[in-house]
Image: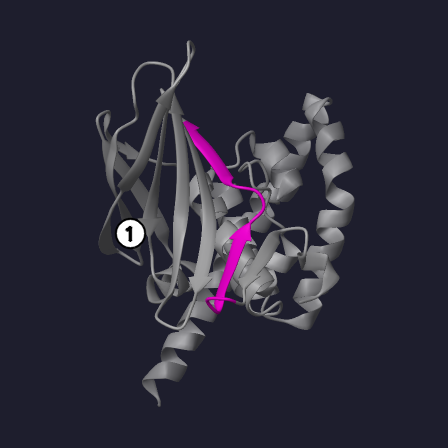
């Protein structure tokens, strides 16, 4: 494991029972009123089993979150997973709930590999569906953990776009500033162009790396100069998204035709 990844995970080995444990140093944090969620990946392997799970610690000011299960939608295929409660606690301000969502290695790898990822948390407060941005960042959190724990070169786009564990990152800084939202369809198209067209090539990776290096201060400047921001939106960002969409369609058509000839 290279030094650049050690800050993300911690490894523990118990030689007396020949057990290896790897866990993310920081949890993935997200929220939906009235609950704040904290999901931390933990991998355990011993002579009898190998598994990976989310260790959960959730908080609500109103009442115990009382989660029942989560549903993962991976490329339009649903998997329902029970939330196993382990502890309840409270103080004068909040109610806390701890538990485990066991994924297993096969499902964890499907989360990392899938093209479309959505998820739902269900419990006392009903069904909670989360935005594409949160789902996108949770998938990147899983990919980053895989890179840290197993293979540092497996998911190159997660290396190029390092995920912030508090779900505040995502890239496409200039486009997001111009369009006003990370979830704007134009920004989503540009993210897909990055993932499907740019990152698979060495030249594309180099472009993305330099874009992430220089674009944050430009995006900040644009937010403070709205007239120029509008100019960039209509003369630069939107036309590029049109071209990106054409290239995405062309690549998908090429891949489908190549698969059909095999």
Task: Give the residue at the far bottom of this rendering.
Answer: 262
Residue at the image point whose x is 76% and y is 48% from the top: 213
Colour scheme used in the picture?
A: one colour
Residue 187, compared with residue 230, is above or below; it is below
Q: Which of the two residues, 140 or 21, is positioned nearer the viewer here?
A: 21
Q: Position of residue 95 (x, y in %)?
A: 36, 19
Left or right, 51 with reference to 149? left
Q: Which of the two residues, 180 or 55, is positioned nearer the viewer here?
A: 55
Q: Secondary structure at mark 1?
A: strand
Residue 174, compared with residue 125, is above or below; it is below
Residue at the image point whose x is 59% and y is 61% from the top: 148
Q: Quadrant of residue 232?
A: top right
Residue at the image point whose x is 30% and y is 26% from the top: 65
Left or right, 44 with reference to 175? left
Residue at the image point whose x is 56% and y is 63% from the top: 149
Which quarter of the image is occupied by the N terminus? bottom right
Which quarter of the image is occupied by the C terminus? bottom left
Q: Which residues are magenta?
A: 16-31
Q: Which of the two residues, 59 or 163, is positioned nearer the viewer here?
A: 59
Q: Position of residue 243 (x, y in %)?
A: 55, 55
Task: Give the residue at the far top of this rendering.
Answer: 92
- What residue is shown with label 1? 73
Q: Is residue 22 magenta?
A: yes
């Amino acid at each position: 494991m290279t030094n650049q990844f050690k800050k993300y995970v911690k490894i523990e080995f118990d030689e007396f029972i020949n057990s290896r444990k790897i866990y993310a140093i920081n949890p993935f944090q997200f929220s939906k009123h009235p609950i704040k969620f904290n999901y931390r990946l933990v991998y355990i392997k011993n002579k009898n089993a190998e598994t990976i799970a989310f260790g959960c610690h959730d908080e609500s000011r109103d009442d115990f979150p009382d989660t029942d299960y989560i549903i993962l939608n991976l490329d339009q295929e649903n998997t329902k997973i029970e939330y196993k409660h382990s502890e309840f606690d409270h103080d004068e301000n909040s109610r806390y709930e701890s538990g485990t969502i066991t994924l297993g290695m096969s499902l964890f790898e499907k989360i990392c590999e899938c093209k479309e990822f959505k998820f739902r948390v269900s419990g006392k407060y009903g069904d909670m569906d989360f935005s594409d941005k949160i789902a996108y960042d949770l998938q990147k959190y899983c990919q980053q953990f895989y890179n840290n724990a197993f293979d540092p070169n497996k998911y190159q786009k997660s290396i190029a776009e390092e995920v912030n564990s508090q779900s505040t990152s995502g890239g496409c800084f200039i486009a997001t500033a111009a369009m006003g939202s990370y979830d704007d369809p134009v920004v989503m198209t540009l993210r897909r162009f990055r993932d499907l067209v740019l990152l698979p090539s060495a030249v594309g990776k180099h472009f993305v790396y330099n874009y992430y290096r220089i674009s944050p201060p430009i995006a900040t400047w644009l937010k403070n100069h709205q007239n120029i921001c509008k100019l960039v939106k209509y003369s630069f960002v939107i036309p590029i998204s049109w071209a990106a969409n054409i290239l995405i369609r062309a690549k998908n058509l090429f891949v489908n035709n190549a698969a059909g000839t095999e």
